[in-house]
Amino acid sequence: MRLMMAIFLMLVFLPATAAEHDALDQTHAAWSALLSRHVSWNAEGTSSTVDYAGFSQDSKALDVYLAALSRVDRTTFDGWNQNDRQAFLINAYNAATVKLILSRYPKLKSIKDLGTLFSSPWKKEFIDLLGERRSLDSIEHGLLRGAPDYSDPRIHFAVNCASIGCPALRPEAYIGKDLDAQLQAQTSRFLSDRSRNRYDTETLTLKVSSIFDWYAKDFDTLAGGVNVFLANHADALGLDAATRERLRAGDISLSYTDYDWKLNSSTP
């Protein structure tokens, strides 16, 4: 009788235990641990640098995290709320980008070195995600921006392309329950960086990152336009009330700063 009861309990509880083992940690603690060790803010808190040599030493832990992401199937993913899905994809993009850099580090000065005249590093299919072998472009443009409920252009300040010109790689994972606050902080930090976003009082021109040029359609569709989005973040840009209202009305010209594609490495 006791043997039969023991077998019954095993049959009841083992599947649940296996399911719990395979379930993704929605806090992305493993990724946060790697980021906290190998990513540092600059003194102003507007950009970050990455210790790719340290990441290389932790490459097995990175692979374990990426493998955990790859085990999530599409049905499970579709059952999550929007914030959890977006946090998952942003983390996947950023972790995959680090993985791509490590494929040739330290023998590269830019992520562009991983491409050729005829192939883009962003189109290289090397990450298994949601049942398919995917590229960085597939994650960003297909799964994030291509989602039917995509509604927040601030994700452009969260995905990181391993370059100095990019918004900072945050030294913590994105988490669904904290996503709005994290995206807001990322946006403010990026716009506060005067090397990339600044108002020229002599020409009365607002010089901003090329991100606002490349993804103008997103800001037009989802935020009332680039000018309106920037006006809503006037404090981070250091604009006074009068300049903010002129910007909102479209009375201030925009120009775009050069994008620095050099690797955002903590070592020269």
Image (cartoon, grey):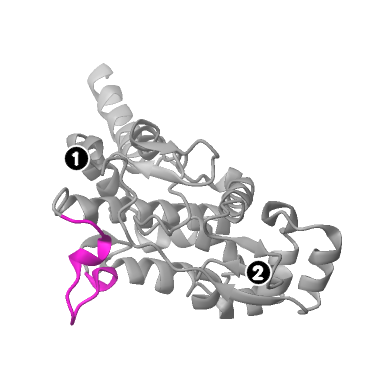
The residue carrying mark 2 is 206
| Picture residue at 17% right of the left edge, 75% below the top | 116
Q: Which of marks 2 and 1 is nearer the N terminus?
A: 1
- Return the x and y of residue 134 as percentages of the image width and height: 27, 67
Residue placed most toward the observer, 206 or 202: 202
- Return the x and y of residue 87 as percentages of the image width and height: 49, 52
User: Taking the image as drawn, is residue 82 in sight?
Assistant: yes
Mark 1: which amino acid? Ser
**Mark 2: few/some/many CA within 10 Å (<14, 14-19, 20+):** many
Mark 2: which amino acid? Leu
Which secondary structure lies at badge 2?
strand
Region in magenta: 108-124
- Return the x and y of residue 122 as percentages of the image width and height: 29, 69
| Picture residue at 18% right of the left edge, 34% below the top | 57
- Quadrant of res 109: bottom left
| Picture residue at 48% right of the left edge, 55% below the top | 167
Residue placed most toward the observer, 119 or 201: 201
The residue carrying mark 1 is 56
User: Taking the image as drawn, is residue 71 in sight?
Assistant: no
Residue placed most toward the observer, 74 or 10: 74
